Image (tube, rainbow, N blue to C red):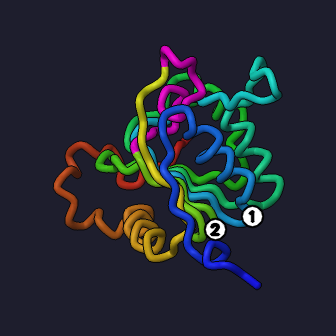
Amino acid sequence: MRSFADIAPMIKPILNDEHLGDALKEALDICRYRLFIATADVKDLHIPSGSRRRSATSILDVFKSLGRKKIEINLLHSGIPSGPFLERLKKGIPPTLTMRRCPRVHAKAVIVDGLWMYLGSANLTGAGLGAKSAKRRNFETGIATDETALIDPVADMLEAVWTGGHCADCGRKAHCPEPLEEPRL
């Protein structure tokens, strides 16, 4: 017989270096169809691999791996990505990755298949997600949840930004070089 714990929604706090394992790595492991990431800053985040964390894999290589599985990846961000990130993009954009830039995006969220979400303060950077050493990473907070009553309104808001639903009434057009800018390499 199923217990209440088996059917109750999961909501758990994510603190500091837990962001890498309990948020990003979990999201990447469970994703089957669509990964939606919203972040202000985008850098060439390297995710430690192996038990000793001596080697690391670029987030773009992870996106390429997801692309081979036909997983749609939407990356909504506000700032110009870091130089190393853009240099890696020049070597080939992962086939299922679409990036859009809106200078008003400050949200930080990872939504997996519309069924799991991280929502918090961490950007898609090593310092934000805890891939940096304890003395170099940021202090970050967030939650992970599978509660659709929390996921759906966040997903709807981000989807409206993604599709340009706010562009017509945006008060920041003068700061937007091109609405919903996608990389042109």
Side (left or right) of 161 relative to 90: left
Secondary structure of the residue carrying tag 2 is loop
Side (left or right) of 25 relative to 146: right
* First along the sequence among labels 2 and 1: 1
Q: Residue at x 49, y 34 (%)?
A: 16
> Which residue is identified by label 1?
32
Amino acid under disc 1:
Arg
Q: Which x, y percent locates residue 36?
A: 56, 58
> Which residue is identified by label 2?
113
Pick the quarter of the image with the N terminus.
bottom right
Q: Is residue 46 magenta?
A: no
Q: Residue at x 83, y 53 (%)?
A: 68
Q: Nearer the viewer, residue 10 or 60?
A: 10
Q: Is residue 124 above or below residue 146?
A: above
The answer to whether residue 150 shows anywhere in this view is yes
Amino acid under disc 2:
Asp
Q: Which x, y percent locates residue 27?
A: 65, 53
Report the residue that reaches farthest toward the left: 171
Q: Which x, y percent locates residue 129?
A: 53, 35
Q: Is residue 135 above or below residue 14?
A: above
Q: How many marks?
A: 2
Q: Is residue 45 above or below residue 52?
A: below
Q: Residue 99 has which mark? A: none
Secondary structure of the residue carrying tag 1 is loop
Q: CA distance from mark 2 to mark 1?
A: 7 Å
Q: Which x, y percent locates residue 139?
A: 41, 30
Q: Residue at x 48, y 50 (%)?
A: 13
The residue range painted magenta reads 121-136
Side (left or right) of 96 relative to 169: right
The answer to whether residue 77 shows anywhere in this view is no
Q: Nearer the viewer, residue 136 or 18?
A: 18
